[in-house]
Image: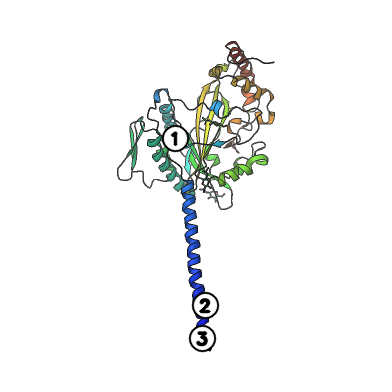
Amino acid sequence: MHTFQTLDVILLSLVAAVTWYFYARGQKTKKEAKAVAAQEAEKVPDPDPLWDFDLATATTRNHLYVNKTVRWPYFQTMAHQPMHINDWIEIDKDYEWYLEEKARVIKEKGKVVIDSCPDNDAPCGELMEILVDYLPKRYPTLFEKIDCPGGGIWNKVTGEKLTGLEGKQGVDALMVCSRLVQDDFLMGREREDGQVYFTGGLVAFPGFYLLSKKINKSLRFAHAPVPYFNEKILMSVERTLKRFKPNESFERTSWEIVDDRNLHWHNMADLHSGEKLPAGFHPKDLFFRVDHQTFRKLPRTKGIIFGVHPIMKRLEDLEDSPLVPMLLSKVHAEGDSKLMKVNPFCLPFPALHIADHPCPFQYKAAPLYQDIMMPYLEELTARQIERGLITYVA
Ligand SMILES: *[C@@H]1O[C@H](CO)[C@@H](O)[C@H](O)[C@H]1NC(C)=O
Ligand SMILES: *[C@@H]1O[C@H](CO)[C@@H](O)[C@H](O)[C@H]1NC(C)=O
Ligand SMILES: CC(=O)N[C@H]1CO[C@H](CO)[C@@H](O)[C@@H]1O
């Protein structure tokens, strides 16, 4: 009886154990299956090839319109939209000039524009990998994969063959990226304290800020001097950056009026509070700078990649863009003055103004050029009405 009971207990335990084992195994396989399914779902499809791409005439998409670059009312929002993978890297006819200029800036400025924290070195490698994979697929007439030990890519525009790429990380990997696309890449990641930090990147064309002033700083810290930013949207921006998945890339555009073509550092960036552009500065020499900003999450290393492709238009070219001069004028005339004194180019994000820039007036922009620009915009609008591009409704 006694023995029997014991045996019973043992048997029961055994049954329980076996049941538990299979149950647990089932759960585990279920969990694994779920993880695999999630990975599948997060997979980014290949871009469509542009077989008839003509570099000599290529332009980016018309970001002025399509992405509501100049917005009215002018609120500070991320104003982002999902990005099709085809639109991640745009190449235009100025490609070679950008690459040469980028190389010059990197050579001159070094760590100020290209750098990586230790926890960003692997993401740099992954960024290079996805670029090298993407470009021959999207632009098969410009790039070709090289099958060699270590792997490589042939840039047929510059004639360079970049090889031995496998295992490249950090700045070495970013140098490869700098020979491939016009875009800059600022990189970030969520660290253990739950905040997003800027951890490195290749930022040759920031216009008004320097990577060296942002690196290893949290998004919160880096945005401290931007009016409204922290109060209003920092939390939501941070949440978005932490949560978005590799399959949930997005894009936005921002704009700025600038006084030269120096993408690295506009002359205006050095003007101080109360200063203006020199007397006699012709409004035709102002540029409308549009930055196409792309946001991707790296699947393996979870790095956050902010790509930026600046596009320059002369102010006079806006004559052919119906309503844009009028809208621009309205934004300046009636926009929130606290915001318009801010450099809207960076807003709200990457809003990379220089927390500790020596110039006390880093959020300036409008007061420097407004007097010169406004009458000219009116001229452009009048010409659009004359040409029948727009109709005047009182
Ligand atoms: C991206 O992948 C996740 C799985 O991790 C899935 O839940 C989500 O719906 C996907 N998003 C899009 C836009 O496909
Ligand atoms: C980043 O900053 C932290 C302190 O905030 C410091 O301990 C660390 O050494 C810095 N890392 C780099 C790569 O500069
Ligand atoms: C070309 C392009 O990407 N256009 C997009 C701009 O934004 C609108 C939504 O606001 C999209 O519908 C367009 O596809």
Above or below 230: residue 377: above
* Residue bearing the label numbered 2: 12
Say which residue appears at 50% left-offset and 30% top-offset: 310
State the CA–CA distance, disc 3 to disc 1. Answer: 82 Å
Badge 2 or badge 3: first in the primary sequence: 3
Q: Which amino acid is tagged 1?
A: Ile
Labels 3 & 1 near each other (Cβ < 8 A): no
Q: Which amino acid is tagged 2?
A: Leu
Q: Which amino acid is tagged 3?
A: Phe
Q: Residue 357: where, in percent of width, then height?
A: 59, 36
Above or below 340: residue 20: below
Q: Is residue 144 left or right of residue 290?
A: left
Q: Residue 270: where, in percent of width, then height?
A: 57, 28
Asked whether mark 3 lies closer than 8 Å to ligand 1, one says no
* Residue bearing the label numbered 1: 106
* Residue bearing the label numbered 3: 4
Asked whether mark 1 lies closer than 8 Å to ligand 2, one says no
Question: Mark 1 against mark 2, which lies toward the viewer?
Answer: 2
State the CA–CA distance, disc 1 to disc 2. Answer: 72 Å
Label 1: which secondary element: helix
Of the pair 45 and 278, the residue shown nearer to us: 45
Task: Answer with the quarter of the image where residue 126 lies.
Answer: top left
Q: Residue 336: where, in percent of width, then height?
A: 69, 29
Badge 1 or badge 2: first in the primary sequence: 2
| Mark 3, other Cα within 10 Å: few <14 / some 14–19 / many ≥20 | few
For the C terminus, the image quarter is top right
